[in-house]
Image (tube, rainbow, N blue to C red):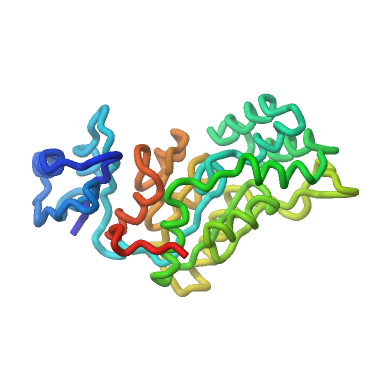
């Protein structure tokens, strides 16, 4: 049994829901049920058929509706692992931090290429960090205060899943100086990120310890699932860049959130029109069951 969930950016109309069901039926699906529209914007279609054919049938150019097709089993996930920059927060921290050193455009160009998968992640990270040598640590606090904004829906997603018993992990190819306060603010139980080297109140331009790269993110997912006694089918991973692809591909539900093309192509679902609460709707959790502390 499969479920197709439609989530509209604004309002989901009954006609749009019925049209989606018709397209599924036209692709050979046997419709077994159409759910009510929840919160005016989301609904499920239950059916038997081919998952890939269903995905193709639901593609509609110009539509402002996100859709996710998935097996009915293990729909509600018990582990959430998420990227930070441009996923749980609205910015790329290294780009904004570079602004305080007067080199934002130079750094941002490299970041964009790295997230597109055009550059080796670790090499690109170390080269950008080296350009921050000498920057006062006070710039980090200033960046946190002035630039870092939590992504809409992030707290609702993380805190609702946590309240329902899920493990929540923030993983970042960025820096602990940002990931620590962001994780605490949003409500993640754990976090892991890269460590900026510091001396005499300034950045040295290097990193301490091993790098949190694409492989490490996937390994954190594996370790988290194992420690919680979960199968990977019970896990959800969300990110936006090429360095998120391994964990997105590994999780039972890999979500590309307003993502770069390579990440979107690797994901089970791509959310392009909604905020992070879409990840609750695709688990069958409407707003009446959302939690924030």
Question: Quick check: can you spot residue 287?
Answer: yes
Indicate left or right for 90 with 70 as reference. right
Task: Locate the N terminus by quadrant.
Answer: bottom left
Q: Which residue is located at x 27 percent, y 64 percent?
A: 73
Indicate left or right for 65 with 208 as reference. left
Q: How many labels, in total?
A: 0
Q: Which residue is located at x 68 percent, y 42 percent?
A: 143
Indicate left or right for 96 with 203 as reference. left
Q: Nearer the viewer, residue 223 or 207?
A: 207
Q: Position of residue 12 (x, y in %)?
A: 20, 42
Q: Position of residue 33 (x, y in %)?
A: 10, 56
Q: Which residue is located at x 10 percent, y 43 percent?
A: 18
Q: Position of residue 206 (x, y in %)?
A: 80, 44
Q: Which residue is located at x 60 percent, y 50 percent?
A: 172
Q: Nearer the viewer, residue 5 or 12?
A: 12
Farthest right residue? 200
């Amino acid at each position: 049994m499969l479920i197709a969930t439609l989530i509209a950016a604004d309002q989901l109309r009954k006609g749009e829901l019925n049209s989606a069901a018709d397209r599924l039926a036209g692709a050979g699906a046997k419709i077994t049920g159409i759910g009510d529209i929840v919160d005016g914007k989301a609904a499920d279609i239950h059916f038997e058929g081919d998952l890939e054919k269903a995905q193709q049938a639901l593609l509609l150019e110009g539509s402002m509706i996100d859709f996710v097709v998935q097996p009915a089993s293990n729909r509600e996930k018990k582990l959430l692992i998420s990227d930070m920059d441009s996923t749980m927060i609205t910015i790329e921290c290294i780009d904004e931090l570079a602004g305080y050193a007067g080199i934002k455009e130079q750094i941002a160009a490299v970041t964009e290429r790295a997230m597109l998968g055009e550059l080796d992640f670790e090499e690109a990270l170390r080269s950008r960090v080296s350009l921050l040598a000498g920057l006062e640590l006070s710039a980090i606090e200033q960046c946190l205060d002035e630039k870092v904004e939590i992504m809409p829906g992030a707290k609702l997603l993380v805190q609702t899943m946590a309240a329902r018993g899920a493990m929540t992990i923030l993983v970042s190819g960025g820096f602990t100086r940002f990931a620590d306060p962001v994780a605490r603010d949003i409500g993640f139980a754990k976090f892991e990120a890269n460590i900026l080297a510091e001396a005499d109140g300034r950045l040295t331009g290097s990193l301490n310890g091993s790098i949190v790269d694409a492989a490490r993110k996937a390994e954190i997912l594996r370790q988290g699932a194992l420690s919680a006694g979960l199968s990977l089918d019970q896990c959800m991973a969300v990110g936006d860049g090429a360095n998120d692809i391994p964990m997105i591909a590994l999780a039972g539900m890999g979500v590309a959130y307003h993502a770069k093309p390579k990440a979107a192509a690797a994901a089970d679902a791509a959310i392009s029109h909604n905020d992070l609460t879409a990840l609750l709707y695709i688990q069958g959790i409407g707003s009446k069951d959302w939690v924030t502390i």
